[in-house]
């Protein structure tokens, strides 16, 4: 059974840092792109970042470029999101998800349970 | 960046109704369009991928159509478990985006 178990959310002050983790099991983690998606309170889903199987390619939404870093440790079957210079507008539930390509079309087919990040003084 | 718009932003429907949700892309995205269902407190669920392919295990009352810039999600006979917010998503280029969502409510 595919499982993505998230940890690391919480309350942080503006300008602070936080690292989210996502532990994967039930599939060959090193064979899949992975992603982070977030949902701010009362808002819709927002794609945040993708990372290739070996970490050699990373893509970010413009609003987090230069502040957030997606990474992975294939030996530990884990995905991370390092968030620096946090702003109030980064407050959201953050989801990790597996990326599958169906006929070259990327999809998020399995999701973590979500973790809340609150940026507030 | 490729922007997605959805209409309507919300709709009221009853069990058994046929529901259609539209998604329009700001530029050509071929058929690189997915639909997700999201219920409060849970994780989103992939419903349709590649514009018209039904994700495994999901009922055939869900269908998708379109290509290029205009896409439609159809629920042929709404069931109680279908009340949720639906998001389209494009994965045409390296920077993926979601639409703003359509809330389907009673």
Image (cartoon, rainbow, N blue to C red):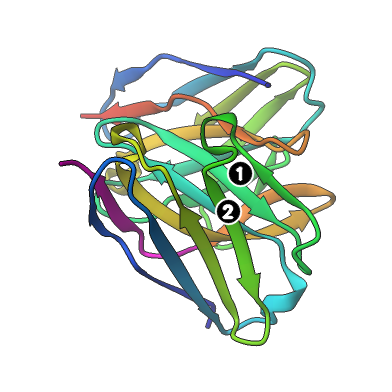
Label 1 marks which chain's residue? B
Residue at the image point whose x is 48% and y is 22% from the top: B20
- The x, y position of residue A76, in whole percent, is 59, 86
Is A116 inside the magenta-drawn segment? yes
* SS for callout 2: strand
Q: Is residue A16 above or below residue A79?
A: above
Q: From what the image shows, is residue A70 above or below residue B96?
A: below
Q: What residue sits 71% from the left and 38% below the top?
A: B91
Q: Position of residue B3 (x, y in %)?
A: 61, 18
Q: Which numbered disc, 2 or 1, marks the residue closer to the eye?
A: 2
Q: Quadrant of the C terminus of chain A?
A: top left
The region drawn magenta spans A111-121
Q: Say whether marks 2 and 1 touch (CB < 8 Å).
A: no
For disc 2, the marked residue is: A69
Among the 4 quarters of the image, the one containing residue A56: bottom right
Name the residue beneath numbered marker 1: B48
x and y, in percent, of residue A67 in the image: 52, 43
Q: Is any atom of residue B77 visible in this view?
A: no
User: In the picture, residue A109 is in which quadrant?
Assistant: bottom right
User: Residue A25's image quarter?
Assistant: bottom right
Q: Nearer the viewer, residue A25 or B20?
A: A25
Q: Residue at x 29, y 51 (%)?
A: A117
Secondary-structure class at tag 1 = strand
Q: Residue furthest left?
A: A121
Asked if residue A23 lies in the magenta stretch, the reply is no
> Residue at point 41% right, 43% down?
A85
């Amino acid at each position: 059974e595919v499982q993505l178990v998230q940890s690391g959310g919480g309350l942080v002050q503006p300008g602070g840092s936080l690292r989210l983790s996502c532990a994967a099991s039930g599939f060959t983690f090193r064979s899949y792109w992975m992603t982070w998606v977030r949902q701010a309170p009362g808002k819709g889903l927002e794609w945040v970042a993708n990372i290739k199987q070996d970490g050699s390619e990373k893509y970010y939404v413009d609003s987090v470029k230069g502040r957030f870093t997606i990474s992975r440790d294939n030996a530990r079957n884990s995905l991370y999101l390092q968030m620096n210079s946090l702003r109030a507008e980064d407050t959201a539930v953050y989801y990790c998800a597996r990326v599958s390509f169906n006929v070259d079309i990327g999809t998020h087919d399995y999701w973590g349970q979500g973790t809340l990040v609150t940026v507030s003084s | 960046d490729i922007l997605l718009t959805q209409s309507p932003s919300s709709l009221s429907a009853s069990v058994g109704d046929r529901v259609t949700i539209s998604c329009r892309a700001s530029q050509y995205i071929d058929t690189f369009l997915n639909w997700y269902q999201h219920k409060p407190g849970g994780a989103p669920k992939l419903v349709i991928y590649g514009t018209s392919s039904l994700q495994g295990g999901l009922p055939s009352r869900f269908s998708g159509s379109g290509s290029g810039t205009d896409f439609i999600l159809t629920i042929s006979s709404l069931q109680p478990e279908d009340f949720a917010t639906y998001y389209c998503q494009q994965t045409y280029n390296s920077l993926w985006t979601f639409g703003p969502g359509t809330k389907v409510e009673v």
